[in-house]
Amino acid sequence: MKCSSIVFLVFPGFELLDLSGPASVFSNANELHKGEPYEVTVASVRGGLIESGSSIAIQTIAVDQVAVGTSTTILVVGGDQPALMAAAKDSSTLAWLKKASGQAGRFGSICTGAFILAAANLLEGKSCTTHWAATQFLKAMQPKVNVLAESLYVIDDKLWTSAGVTTGLDMALEMLRQDLGNTLMARVAQRLVVYAHRPGNQSQFSNLLELQSKSDRRYSNLLAWIDDNIDQAINVSEMADYMCMTERTFYRKFTAAFNLTPSKYLEEARLNRAKLLLEQTISVKKVSEAVGFKSESAFRTRFESRFGLSPSMYRRLHKNPWCN
């Protein structure tokens, strides 16, 4: 592999972790691989010292001094709302991004850096993600963008976007894996004491908790009942009986209240409980029984489909260190 250029674009008030985490992935790869495969550059629109939101200043080069080609990866870091809005209004920044993204082999963002890509009209018609707290704002700002709110990172052709802060590490590790293979990626992850590989479609937050927090109070007791009986073969008819409704009426009202069918909610509740049990190192077979699946194979299939990794792998990655 010839030397690849990794260019981080920063601006006043940027989030330091969005830069330092992913940059550490590539710098550690250079130490562990012969020939230093990556050239890491931090750039800003005019160059010079740029102060982060943490008040730590970083020396940068001006973007017009950056040579961009097919071996270049451009990553826009995130920041808080005032810093982002100022950067998103800088015509020089946007003009350079539009031109450079067309020349680069890869381009993208870390965390809320996606808003600067959006301001440069580089997300339209694409799939992407950003910090979970900002996904609704991005959807409102760019209705023609497919915002995947739960993903840790999203790859859409040469566009790479990651979710909140530390997920930039996951995305950088995936870039490294694709560039130089699993072995080096695993060695770098071990050095940084992070998960060797978290799939991009693994959820960055529990949407079940969000649904419960926004639910109609009339359903509070039902949700508690479901939680208490999650190991049982609950069906929609039993839920309707609990609510003293006909099955048709219950289905319609529940779906309207949660924007989710009762059976889909039940599956989400089962799988989210399963995650907690797996973190306690309980066997996959016992977990499948504890969350009401009729067969272990069905549980494995649904879990992997939902979270992008097998129950066994999830347990290895998320093992609670306080559990034997």
Image: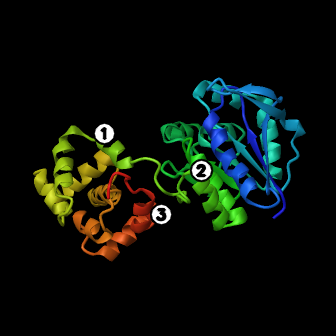
Taking the spot 66% from the left edge, 40% from the top edge, the residue there is 20
Disc with the residue nearer the chain's start (1 vs 2): 2
Mark seen at residue 192 = 2
Taking the spot 51% from the left edge, 57% from the top edge, the residue there is 201
Residue at image mark 3: 308
Q: Residues within 10 Å of mark 3 (few under 14, many from 20)?
A: some
Residue 285, above or below 208? below
Q: Quadrant of residue 31?
A: bottom right
Q: Give the left or right position of residue 76, taking residue 276 as reference.
A: right
Give the image location of residue 116, x and y in percent. Answer: 68, 37
Disc 3 marks which amino acid? Gly
Residue at image mark 1: 213
CB contact under 8 Å: marks 1 and 2: no
Give the image location of residue 144, x and y in percent. Answer: 60, 47
Q: Secondary structure at mark 3?
A: loop
Taking the spot 37% from the left edge, 53% from the top edge, the residue there is 320
CB contact under 8 Å: marks 3 and 1: no
Disc 2 marks which amino acid? Leu
